Image: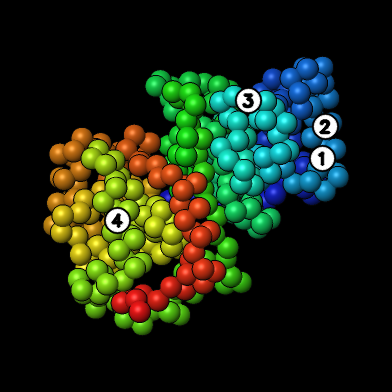
Amino acid sequence: MKLALNWKPLTPETWNDFEALFGPRGACGGCWCMTWRVSRADFKSNGGAGNRLAMRALVDAGREPGVLLYEDGRAVAWCAVAPREEYVRLGASRVWAPVDEQKVWSVSCFFVDKKARNKGLSVAVLKAAVEFARSKGAKIVEGYPQELKERLPPAFVFMGVMPTFVHAGFSEVTRRSPTKPIMRSVVRKTNADGKTAAKKEWGEDVKLARKKDKLTKDDALKSTMFRDMLREVSRVPRGKVATYGDIAYAAGYPGAARQVAWALHAESAGLPWHRIVGAGGTILLTGEHGFEQRLHLQAEGVSFLGLKVNMAAHHHGFDLRKAAETLAKKPAKSSVRRKIGPQR
């Protein structure tokens, strides 16, 4: 049965829900989600009561330090997200030091009500946090999960685990510790109707290939965009997979995941087409083609969790910094309005 979920930012109006979710212990050890916001010495000297007052002061001052996820009207999960500079202790960390000079929003904490765990709510509240950050103008959302070798108590993984971020569409960008990757989600703007602006503008410029079966091999090879996409497909190594969205962004065309599928439909000879999957590791091809793709992946050592690829183990992390630089060098219109089809 589908859960009835919605989310709200933490504000004075939702404070009581936040307080009820965290309980008298402030989620864990009197933290009240202030761990990264103050120095270690201040955190300890504040104690539970002081940390609660500090968080309440932030909220009363108009700050919205995260989002609450509701199930049937009750707050069941929390995700802290804010501009990275608000988390003073992240700046002092060697493992989580800034990746580059880009402005990012950071996901610093999760908390799920004990009675609501093991229902996929961590992924849902993370997606809500990304949407909230997008609404505030964020372009990149960054997370610092753990890649677990064994199951740990929730208190030891409050920054999240890698599969949660993978299923929410994040990609690894660097790793300075064997079990602590830094992952990012590149946020796209949306229009008033809620659709991504990139996709809407792509649709306006589709002249040649409104349907994938109209795109020929010759078209794909002549088109700069499709050549860029097919080049990125060729770079996905054996034993790894990438999503259509990954390929589109790495090629410099964010929001053009569907066009990646068109390009592969037109020309896949000699390319590892089977290593491209849907978001979350879904095999999008149907019938015999989907079965063939699964067999190819299993032959390369790719494991599955049910019907989906185990993305935590096999997701290929493109260099998002390099992709962002490529995108920035293109003319302003080319990132979302480059004509599909032969380029003149």
10 Å crowding of disc 4: few (<14), some (14-19), many (20+): some
Q: CA distance from mark 4 to mark 1?
A: 47 Å
When the figure is inspected, residue 272 is found, relative to residue 177, above or below; the finding is below
Foreground label between 2 and 3: 3
Q: Is residue 11 left or right of residue 209?
A: right
Say which of marks 3 and 1 sits in front. 3
Q: Are marks 1 and 2 in contact (CB under 8 Å)?
A: yes
Amino acid type of the residue that numbered disc 1 sits on in the rendered structure: Leu
Say whether disc 4 or disc 1 marks the residue closer to the N-terminus: 1
Q: Nearer the viewer, residue 62 or 83?
A: 83
Q: Marks 2 and 3: CB-CB under 8 Å?
A: no
- The location of residue 168, given as percent across then percent down, is 47, 46
Between disc 2 and disc 4, the foreground one is 4
Kindly identify the residue that appears in the image at 19 percent across and 60 percent down: 268
Residue at the image position 71 percent from the left and 39 percent from the top: 85
The residue beneath circle 4 is 231
Query: Disc 2 designates what residue?
Result: 54
The tag earlier along the polypeptide, 3 or 1, is: 1
Question: Which mark is drawn over residue 93?
Answer: 3
Whichever of labels 2 and 4 marks the residue nearer the N terminus, that label is: 2
The residue positioned 15% from the left and 45% from the top of the image is 295
Mark nearer the viewer, 4 or 1: 4
Tell me: residue 81, above or below residue 154. below
Label 1 belongs to which residue? 58
Q: CA distance from mark 3 to mark 1?
A: 23 Å
Q: Nearer the viewer, mark 4 or mark 3?
A: 4
First in sequence, mark 2 or 3: give its number: 2
Secondary structure beneath label 4: helix
**Distance in Å between CA atoms under marks 2 and 3:** 22 Å
Cα distance between the residues tagged 1 and 2: 6 Å
